[in-house]
Amino acid sequence: MADFQANLRPFAELDRAGRTRRLRRLAEAALTDYDVPVARLTPLARGRNTTFRVDGADGHRYVLRVERPDGPSVAQVRAEIAWLSALCRETDLVVPRPVPTRHREPATVVADPAVPEPRTCVLRHWVEGRFLDERLTPTQLYRLGEVTARLHRHGARMNGLDRGRVDDLSAFGRAQVDGFSATVVERAVALTGEDVRAALARVRAVRAALGFGADVFGLVHGGLHQENYLFHRGRVAVVGFDDCGYGHYAYDLAVTVEAIAHLPHRAQLREALLDGYRSVRPATFATDPAVLDAFAGLRRVQLRLRALDGTA
């Protein structure tokens, strides 16, 4: 074993394809913890985590997610799955249905000598549909707004889950008592530039003005961009719950708004999204334009930090 590891190129020096090849063997080991007869394992390109499509010999399809080493803890993964399981039991929303291990555990932790640390792995049923971007229509965004509001309404009942804040500035910020402290802000400015200071001051003021009441703050998806919602037979499906956590509802909508900002028909899409949301949750600050713009600014800074620092 020692000779095998000594001859391996360090994992950190591999490109994405090389890391995926290493993680494939780990994924194969993880699947032995499930009562799923595997016929084929195919890497998927989407997302920050490494994911594989699993074609079962029984004709069913699944997705196996291999968590990042700096990703959520096992307890946080359990909390994510608890919300997904509750959504599957209590609503007709189209979300990934978790698959427990043969020991009825929501996830498994697997080690491989070619990977420097153990990885948490989660298996879910495949969700059918198409991801869209330029071809998104106002009707589709209206439906997404409805679904987002229903997620928020359901999440309001899920108290005490072990999930962090989604609208803190960065992973460094989440590790501090105050995720928007002067230390956190100065670190962000040092990494991204002085131009972000005004945006951060604005969103901090908006967060303070909104407060943390149940009408404005709760459990949210945290990543409702075009790679996490898809369409099938007129319905919206939502995937990618690995960023879920507690935050202002407006932040969840702002993620969607910011992700469609490059589209020429963004104004119509935005209004349709908010109309759909208000059709389910009519009296809400989450759709206030100034509030949304502030959180969209936060999202832009978060993405810049993620690209530069790798910790957002």
Image (cartoon, helix red, strand yellow):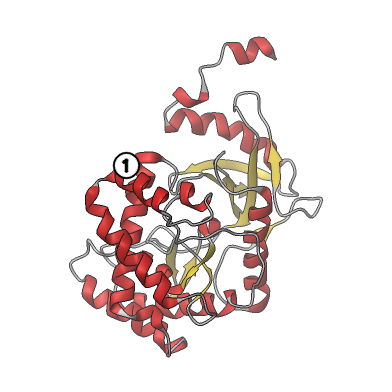
Query: Against 236, is 288 above or below?
Result: below
Q: Is residue 277 visible?
A: yes
Residue furthest to the front in view is: 182
Q: Is residue 35 left or right of residue 21?
A: right
Q: Secondary structure at mark 1?
A: helix
User: Where does the N terminus fall, quadrant-wise?
Assistant: top right
Q: Quadrant of residue 132?
A: bottom left
* Residue at point 60%, 11% (across, down): 6
- Residue 299 position in % (x across, y down): 35, 59
- Residue 61 position in % (x across, y down): 59, 54
Query: To which residue does mark 1 refer?
Result: 191
Q: Is residue 177 left or right of residue 269?
A: right
Q: Is residue 104 left or right of residue 26?
A: right
- Residue 77 position in % (x across, y down): 64, 54
* Residue at point 42%, 72% (across, down): 208
Count of marks placed on residues: 1
Q: Residues within 10 Å of mark 1 (few under 14, many from 20)?
A: some
Q: Quadrant of residue 17?
A: top left
Query: Against 173, is 209 above or below?
Result: below
Query: Against 110, is 157 above or below?
Result: below
